[in-house]
Amino acid sequence: MSFSYPGGRAKALVIGIDGLRWDRIADAPAPRLRALMRDGLFAPSLLVPGHGAETVSGPGWSTVASGVWPAKHGVLDNSFTGRRYDEHPDFLTLLKRANPALSTFAALNWPPLTDEGTFGPEIDQLFRGDGEEHGYYTEDERMTKASAAVLRDEDPDAGFVYLSCIDAAGHGWGAGSKEYLAAVAAADTWIGELLDAVAARRTYRLERWLILLTTDHGHTNAGGHGGYTDAEARTFVIAHGPEVAPGRRADVRLVDVAPTVLRHLGVAVPDRLDGRAIV
Ligand SMILES: [Zn+2]
C-alpha cells in the first residue's frame, strides 16, 4: 500500500544531474528517469545568453541553488569570480535560516560547489566528495550511498544530491556516444537508490515528499558545452510529488527549483528571487 496523508509532513529531495541532455534519456536504459518524466511534471527549457554567463556548471548550479539568474548571483563561469552568495544563498541555507528546526543535507562531489560556497556551511550535513581526485563514478556511488542512508535512516527535511558521471562521460566521449548513455544508466540506478531510500522510510506514509531533478547545462553530441547552441543550452526540471500536476510544461526553469522547495516546506519565498514556486 502506498499513499500519503494530505496533511503529512512536507519534505523535499533535489537531485542535480550535471550535463544531462534530457533528449538522450529515451535512448538509455533509464527506467527511473523515464517513470519520473511520465508520471510527474516534465519541463524542458533552454538557457538564454542574456545574463553574460557561459553554459557551464558554476553558473548553472548557482542558479539552481539560489533561484536567481547569473545577473544576480554573479557567477558567469567556473572561476566563480563575482559570486554573491551572501545576497543570494542556496535554498537549503534559506530554509535553515527561516526555520532552524528543519534538517538539511547536501552531497556534492564537484569540489567548487562546497569550496566556493554554492551550497553553504550552514547546511546541517555536507558530504564533500572529489570526483576530480577519485573519479566521478566512484564519487557518485559514494555520495549516493551516504545520501540514501540519511534519507532512509535519519530525518532530513530537505536535501540536494549531485551526480556528475554523465557530464564526465560527455566530456570524454560526447552526448552522442554509447559511453554517455551508459553514464545515464548508471545515474538512473543511483536515482533509483535514492528514491527507494525515501520510500523505505518508516514514516514515509505520514510524509509528503517532493522530488525535483534538474541539470545545469547540456552537451554537444561530440562533447563539450559553454556556448548557446540548443544542445549546450538544453536544460529541464522534473517534479514529482502529491502537489505536482503531471504533464509537460514549457514555463518551468532552473530558477524555479529553489522557490518550489521553499514553498513546499512552508517558508516564504523572498521577492528578490527570479523564479516562482510550481507548488
Ligand atoms: Zn556542469
Image (spheres, rainbow, N blue to C red):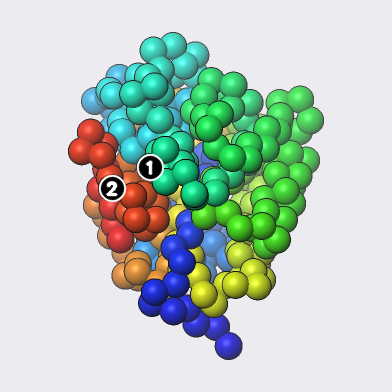
Residue 268's disc is: 2
Contact between marks 2 and 1 (CB within 8 A): the answer is yes
Residue depicted at x 46% and y 66%:
9
Q: Eyeballing the image, is 217 above or below 265?
A: above
Callout 2: 10 Å neighbours few (<14), some, many (20+)?
few
The part of the image, by quadrant, that contains residue 235 is top left
Name the outermost residue toward the left.
Answer: 271
The secondary element bearing badge 2 is classed as: loop
- Say which amino acid is labelled 1: Ala
Quadrant holding the N terminus: bottom right
Residue 243 appears left or right of 144:
left
For residue 68, above or below residue 215: above
Q: Judge by depth and name the residue closer to the eye, 69 or 224.
A: 69
Q: Is residue 107 above or below residue 15?
A: above
Residue 188 in percent (x, y) is at 63, 57
Front in this rendered view, residue 108 or 53: 108
The furthest residue to the top: 81
Front position in the image: 228 or 39: 39
- Image coordinates of residue 227 in percent, x first then y, are 39, 26
Which residue is the extreme one toward the bottom?
1
Residue type at the position of mark 2: Ala
* Quadrant (top left, top right, bottom left, bottom right) of the C terminus: bottom left
Residue drawn at 46 percent across, 36 percent down: 93
Residue linked to disc 1? 98
Task: Tell how many labels.
Answer: 2
Q: Position of residue 183 (x, y in %)?
A: 66, 48
Q: Earlier in the sequence, mark 2 or mark 1?
A: 1
The residue carrying pointer 1 sits among few (fewer than 14), some (14 to 19) or many (20 or more) residues within 10 Å by Cα, namely: some
Which tag is nearer the camera, tag 2 or tag 1?
Answer: 1
